Every structure is written in C-alpha cells, then in structure tokens.
Image: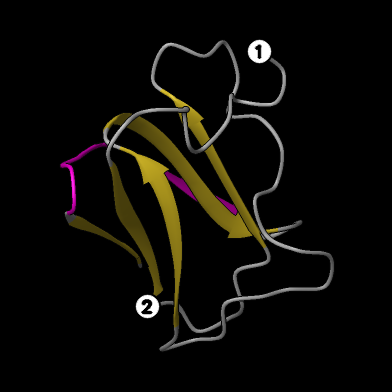
Amino acid sequence: MITGGDLIRPGEATGTIQVVNNTGGVLDVVLISECNASTYGLDRMADNEVINPGSARDFTVSAGCWDVDAGAFGVGEARQRMTVAPGGLTTYTVN
C-alpha cells in the first residue's frame, strides 16, 4: 500500500491521533499508515498546512495499530507506533 491505507475503514469504530508539535519549528509533513502497510504512505495534511510550534492537529482514524511519521521537509522526522482505542485520544508529541 503506497498510500498507507485509508485512515477510516468502513464499519469500524474510530478514535483520534493528536500530533503535538513540541519542537522549535513547524511540522509540515505527517504520514500515517496502518501498522501492516509496507510504507508510511502520503502526507495526511492539506497542501501548505503546517503544525506550528506549541500547536496540535487531530486525525480521525479507525481504532487499531498505526505508524505515525511527523517532521519538517529537509530538517528531520520522528516516528512512533501507537494503538488507538475506539473513541479514544492517542497523543503523539514530537520533540
């Protein structure tokens, strides 16, 4: 799956991944994929969208296992595997 898979799978309960920017610069790329996908997939943010320092962005996903890669193009990235509970909020703070 080059795209990383759909964030919401039909008929499944959902939860939220919250990406928090605790760095000194903007995050301009967030890749989210199912844990069994072969790649992190495509950027899940809109064109020209960023997460400013001290800010957060929520992504609604199906409950289950997800790999998240967040960073700034040309600067660096951070990766985390997480499990999202149905109706739950899973926070990923990028330092």
Give the Cα distance between marks 2 and 1: 30 Å
Q: Position of residue 30 (x, y in %)?
A: 58, 53
Check contact, mark 2 vs mark 1: CB within 8 A: no
Mark closer to the observer (2, 1): 1
Name the residue rendered at 65%, 50% in the picture. Answer: 44
Q: Residues within 10 Å of mark 2 (few under 14, many from 20)?
A: some
User: Mark 1 or mark 2, which is nearer the start of the sequence?
Assistant: 1
Task: Judge from the rendering whether residue 12 lies leftward or rightward of residue 85; answer left or right.
Answer: right
Q: Looking at the image, which is closer to me, 35 or 22? A: 35
Q: Position of residue 9 (x, y in %)?
A: 46, 28
Q: Residues within 10 Å of mark 1 (few under 14, many from 20)?
A: few
Q: Which residues are magenta?
A: 76-87
Tag 1: amino acid? Met
Name the residue rendered at 76%, 63% in the picture. Answer: 46
Dominant SS type (magenta): strand
Residue that mark 2 sits on: 22
Q: Quadrant of the C terminus?
A: bottom left
Q: Quadrant of residue 36?
A: top left
Q: Position of residue 71 (x, y in %)?
A: 58, 58
Tag 2: amino acid? Asn
In the image, residue 1 sits, relative to residue 78, either above or below, namely: above
Instruction: Please name the colour scheme applied to the rendered image.
Output: secondary structure
- Which of the labelled discs sits on residue 1, or is there none? 1
